Image (cartoon, rainbow, N blue to C red):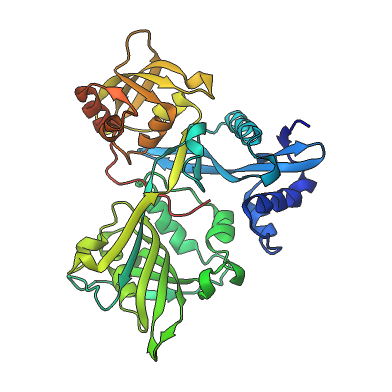
Amino acid sequence: MSVTVRAIRDDEFETFRTTFCTAIGFEPHPDDAEALRAVLAPERVHAGFEGDTMVGTTGAFSLRVSVPGGELPMAGTTLVGVLPTHRRRGVLRSLMQAHFDDALRRGDVLAGLWASEGAIYGHFGYGPAAAQHELELVTHRARLLEPATGSIRLAAMDRGDGWAIPAALYDAVRAKVPGMLARDDTWWRWRRWYDPRHRRPGGAGRLQLAIHEDSGAPRGYLLYRRSSEWHAGYPDDRLIIVELVATTPAARHALWSYALSMDLVARVKAWNQPADEPLPWLLADPRSVHGTSRDSLWLRILDLQRALTGRRYASTGSLSLAVTDPQLPANHGNFRLDASPHGATLHPHAGPADLTIHIRDLAAVFLGGHRLHTLAAASRVHASPATLTLADTLFASPQAPWCPEIF
């Protein structure tokens, strides 16, 4: 029997949630249903049906993502799954095409996701556009070069607007850092503040909030939790950093100092820090921080015209591009990009191309997190050395892309 794809009805939402969890081997928790409904509209959810049976799922959060010089609407690709009984039958491809078509109808310029498997989403035009550092420090070895300034206070999180100060600080940073997502009160409440016991990793404690202040004004915040452990009679607590956001270097310095100096804490772990995190330069011994790097936010350019004209560029220059996009024909072809720090135009181009690139690789460099020279060394793009230098200059970002949360 063939599989058909359509948007789900409101009364199919729980079936959708159960089908997705079955597809990826999770057990749905009843307490999470309200949180998911608060941020994911049923009309943005598509499912594959064999007869009346739901066999595959995909959803989209309505997001806005920071890009160099502005922000763009983005479909947050999420909850993608196909039942084990229906893999290798084209269900995922049909779901993704419906997802793209619906996102374009709604005016989304980009689609973005965190890839559960890195080999899958390049086939659909996604490229890894941002990276993350996973850091771990042993506190007795991690000593700061200089003392921190300002003060740290613990803030209550149980107030109805407990995120008000973090939200203002987050927005100030988001304006400068590509890859960060806009958050309204609903998103703060149900995504970042939502902290039921069953979602705390490895028996760790509740979320706690520390705010850095300088001259009486908030400059940064730290969301964290602790895991209490004892070994051979000695305290061996873990402090897990969930989110560290600072509007000034002094605030970042002070928040790291706070995390590294807490009583009973033997290790500090931070699973998602920016690729340009300056922590090693704050330490007397940079080797005291251990880390690994990997991809975080993947992007898919849905509307090439609006994407390339919707960001700003680090310098002025022109490029003719030969773009390959097998799924979305409007993006496929030769174009001329005239770019500057003040804006850009994109027009069809009849002449030869300076740069030949697949849509997934254009997405990978879109936020300024990767260089065209690197992709050319892997034969992913083709251009002269001079063109690569110009392209890298145009697409550069002064700050590395960072997406502080999985969605």
In the depicted view, which residue is nearer to us: 81 or 187? 81
Question: Residue 155's x, y, as percent?
Answer: 45, 73
Q: Can you see residue 338?
A: yes
User: What percent of the width, then of the height, locates residue 375?
Assistant: 31, 33
Q: Above or below — where is 144 with respect to 92? A: below
Give the percent coordinates (x, y) of residue 168: 43, 57
x and y, in percent, of residue 366 in the image:
37, 34
Q: Nearer the viewer, residue 252 or 204?
A: 204
Picture quadrant where residue 268 is located: bottom left
Furthest toward the bottom, the residue is 233
Q: Is residue 214 among the parts visible in the rendering?
A: no
Occupied quadrant, residue 343: top left
Left or right of 107 in this view: 246? left
Q: Which residue is rendered at x = 72% and y = 48% of the image?
A: 16
Give above or below for 235 relative to 219. below
Taking the spot 27% from the left edge, 43% from the top edge, the residue there is 398
Compared with 20, 67 (above or below) is: above
Q: Which of 380 and 302 is in front in this view?
A: 380
Residue placed most toward the observer, 192 or 122: 122
Q: In this view, does 334 lie to the left or right of 8?
A: left
Residue at 40% over, 73% down: 239
